Amino acid sequence: MSDRNSPIGVLDSGIGGFSVVRQVQRLLPEENILYFGDGAHVPYGNHPEETIVALSRYMFDFMEQRRVKVLLVGCNTISCVIDRCADLVSCPIFNAVQAGVDGALEKNGGKVGVISTVFTHNCGIYPQRILAQSPQGRTVCSRGCPNLAGLVEHNLGSGDGMVQVEEELRRELGDLVEDEQIQCCVLGCTHYSLVSDSIQKLFPQLALVDPAQEMARALKDYLQGNNLVTDRTEKGQVSIYTTGDVKEYTLRAKQTGLERVDQVSAYPPLEI
Ligand code: DGL
């Protein structure tokens, strides 16, 4: 059984969920966090659904075995298949897509852009959910970006690499901003939140919706409302497990501003 002092679980295909951890640390600094990033199989967004489900179930199982008190699915792509994984965990689940939809609904009127992985785009989940809850006349332009998450995963902090990331951002977002005239853009892949400064630099007028921020806010409300905030008074720590490269994850944790990382450990990947 988990209790109020059990860790909060955060999972993602890679480092994208660090954007969620960062926000949770900001709002709930005493909480311990357990992170799983499937670096061996990132990016998920170009895999077929059955593969994404198998890989996601492996991570859900990991979290259930460690008795997390709540699970944050810090990955929009996995959020699309959550109904096929939720049976594995006994704790409440928060997901990035719902957070992104809630954030978009808070923006007033106008055209909403969504950039995401190809899988999330093909699911149509953002347009469906935003339009279902919006007054008539709202338009959603969704764009699937095949290369962006992988580029972010492996290029953060590298000068040349970030030039490539920015070129890709310009290619994917340029016409949404200039031709479609979107007024806000949902970062429908948590990797993109890690380069929100670059997006803002390229498109300074564009209002961004960051599901990572929304998730942390919703989590705080939930924990407070259900007496599940930890009663420890010292600051919490983050334990990271990855099926990818431990050194790369250690570096990325630092680059993305995670605090109090007590360990980064290797975990065997699911064979697919
Ligand atoms: N960070 C993930 C998301 O939010 C996906 C990136 C990927 O693995 O393709 O969708």
Image (tube, rainbow, N blue to C red):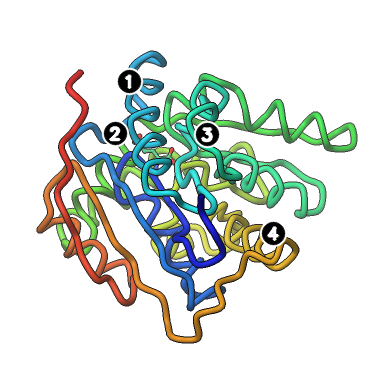
**Is tag 3's residue or tag 4's residue first in the polypeptide sequence?**
3
- Name the front one of labels 2 and 4: 4
- Name the front one of labels 3 and 1: 3
Q: Mark 4 = which residue?
A: 222
Q: Seen from this angle, which residue lies furthest right?
A: 135
Marks 1/2 in contact by CB < 8 Å: the verdict is yes
Q: Mark 1 = which residue?
A: 47
- Residue 243 percent location from the top left of the image: 18, 41
- In the rendered image, the vertical position of residue 199 relative to residue 51, given as above or below: below
Q: Residue at x 54, y 51 (%)?
A: 70
* Dot 2 beta carbon under 8 Å from ligand 1: yes
- Name the front one of labels 4 and 1: 4
- In the image, taking residue 87 as reference, residue 262 lies left or right, namely left
Q: Mark 2 = which residue?
A: 43
Crowding near pointer 4: few (<14 within 10 Å), some, many (20+)? some
* Dot 3 beta carbon under 8 Å from ligand 1: yes
Marks 2/4 in contact by CB < 8 Å: the verdict is no
Q: Which residue is drawn at 40% across and 52% down?
A: 17
Q: Which amino acid does label 2 sit on?
A: Pro
Q: Distance between the residues labelled 2 and 3?
A: 14 Å
- In the rendered image, the vertical position of residue 18 relative to residue 66, given as above or below: below
Q: Mark 3 = which residue?
A: 79
Local secondary structure at mark 3: helix
Q: How far apart are marks 3 and 1 (CA)?
A: 14 Å
- Residue 45 percent location from the top left of the image: 37, 28
- Residue 210 percent location from the top left of the image: 56, 55
Local secondary structure at mark 1: loop
